[in-house]
Image (cartoon, rainbow, N blue to C red):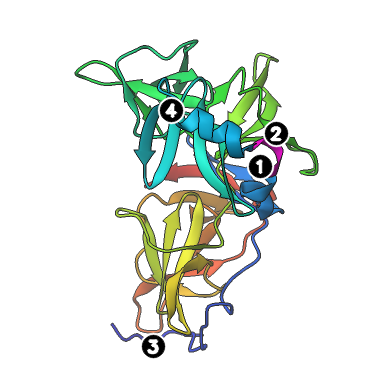
Amino acid sequence: MNRNRSHRSTRHRSRHRHRRVHRHSRYRYHARWRHHRYWRHRRWYGGFWFGRVIIRSATWIAIANSSTTTTVVVYSSTYYHVNPWYRDVIYEGEEGGVPTTAPVGYETDEFPKGGMTVQHDGATYTYADGAFYQSKSGGGWLVVQSPVGAEVKSIPEDAVKHDDEGDLEMYQFDRAFWSKTTNDAGETVYRVEPAPPAEEIDEIPAGSPSFDADGETYYYVEFNWYVAYDENGKKGFTNGEPDIDAQVDTLPEGVTDLEIDGVTYKQFDSIYFEEVEGDDGTTFYQVVDLDEDDMVEVGGE
């Protein structure tokens, strides 16, 4: 639809032009958006963890080939259930294994050893060795995605502490992440945090929220925004958010109302929208930059 809009953007966009520097991302927690600082060192997500805990060569081969080891393949990754779980990796050209949680999608008829009940956002989980299980209607237990924001009283002994996150005391156990904090009862707990954002991903999962701004489509995946790129024959999706003043016809499902100085804005994660009237009298939305210190949540859609 063509509209006579003031300040209509005709900027040329490229993979890097519209990528903004993120101060933080957010996740939904008790019906409000909580801050999650972006990890400064992406090496933590790979080599840093492997270098600390990897089991190498002959020892790993013996574990992987043991008759008492159960092998499970989930999303092209191979897991070995000994006690605890291990994941097959290649590090510095050498095959090895790293301790991990039970993989998402794994099913078992036995109640998770040492499992404890965790309530979060109206759902009931059983937490054991860093993994979250839910009971199946037909019996048994299924490992599900760790619910971001859930709080537990312990994490695996091999979890690695990262010391340079300022006021956040962060821990990593393979692909699982926690921050150490204190709950309302004054108890020390560990809160599930999102994984560090991938700089690039190959595809967008079905059902991911999205919206169009100035001719680009932005997708929300794992608490991060991505936009498509096509450079030198390579296609994929990279971290990116729309520019301030980018114009939007339809907001993503799940936006929240925010009121500042009597004006109501729309928010989804780290993106804020203001309703604007065009020259032809129709309304649309514009991406704005807000001072979060003065925000008051007033409702949702």
- Given this view, does label 2 or label 4 mark the residue nearer the observer? 2
Our reading of the magenta stretch's main secondary structure is: helix
The answer to if 211 sits in the magenta stretch is no
Q: Amino acid at mark 1?
A: Trp
- Given this view, does label 4 or label 3 mark the residue nearer the observer? 4
For marks 2 and 4, give the CA distance: 27 Å
Q: Which label's residue is closer to the chain start, 2 or 4?
A: 4
SS category of the residue bearing label 4: loop
Q: Which residue is mark 3?
A: 4
| Left or right for 19, reference 116 | right
Name the residue furthest left: 138
- Given this view, does label 3 or label 2 mark the residue nearer the observer? 2
Mark 3 and mark 2 residues within 8 Å of each other at the beta carbon: no
For marks 3 and 2, give the CA distance: 55 Å
SS category of the residue bearing label 1: helix
The image shows residue 3 at horizontal and vertical percentages of 35, 85
**55 above or below 216?**
above
Mark 2 and mark 1 residues within 8 Å of each other at the beta carbon: yes
* Residue displayed at 80% across by 44% down: 164
